[in-house]
Image (cartoon, rainbow, N blue to C red):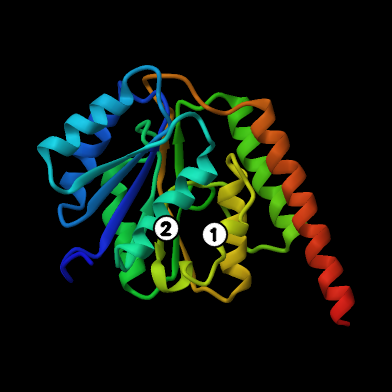
Amino acid sequence: MPPAAVELLVVLPTYNERDSLAAVVAGVRRSLPEADILIVDDGSPDGTGAIADALAADDSHVSVRHRAGKSGLGTAYVLGFAAALSDGYRTVVAMDADGSHRAEDLPALVAASRAGAGLVIGTRWMEGGRIVNWPAYRRWISRGGTWFARALLGSRLRDLTSGFRVIQLEWLRRIDLEALDSQGYGFQVETAWTLERMGCPVTEIPITFVERADGRSKMSLGIVLEAFANVVRWSWRSRSRRTTAD
């Protein structure tokens, strides 16, 4: 178990992020010097794993888990969350390793968590939230996906697809991580909605989301379709259970 003063684990899934990873890790260390960082690399062919190993060798707050190949964002987070639970952390931070989530926004998210929120979401679609350099179609996918998920799932959250979040482990351990079945960005919707239904106190904090300057986006049609299909399936399952209970 980490010392009591070290309560935070930041999980950074990576796949081909060699141009951004070092800067992201440095930003996290500046903004949250007390936090540990776990990099989960999916066998990046561009050498990201070697960069992660070098960062870990130079800083005891950084560790790395290597996976054999690209296994999906969802399973990378499940691995990171399971590590946080088994190692005795109190809080886990999820964020992208491509620079789109600004490290300088971390203190506000962590402060909200320490104030009592079980889940804190860095939200783009609220007053004070901004997106920089995103093309129109990405805005449409994000806003449309959030609207669609909110409507079908009955959620009040304003940015269900945001991957920038802080979770208290006391709430995360109530989720059966192995039962989560989203491989792509639908994982963000699934975990937030699951916690919301459990009665987890949720706070949304406005953030500035910056389109990545290096590398290529992992967004694809397959990821969008997976999230769409899963939202429909979760909605149907939830309604069926309510009907059976009635």
Asked whether disc 2 touches disc 1, contact meaning CB atoms under 8 Å apart, the reply is yes
Q: Which amino acid lies under the numbered mark 1 shown in the image of this protein? A: Leu
- Asked if 206 appears above or below 98 in the picture, the reply is below
Residue 21 visible in the displayed image: yes
Q: Where on the picture, by quarter, is residue 183?
A: top right
- What element does badge 1 sit on? helix
Q: Is residue 38 left or right of residue 195?
A: left
- Asked if 39 appears above or below 171 in the picture, the reply is above
Q: Dot 1: within a 10 Å radius of its alpha carbon, few (fewer than 14), some, or many (20 or more) residues?
A: some
Q: Nearer the viewer, residue 242 or 87?
A: 87
The residue that label 1 is drawn on is 177
Pick out the residue farthest to the front: 68
In the rendered structure, find residue 82 and report the number of the disc placed on it. 2
Q: Nearer the viewer, residue 161 or 40?
A: 40
Residue pictured at 18% horizontal, 71% vertical: 4
Pick out the residue farthest to the bottom: 246
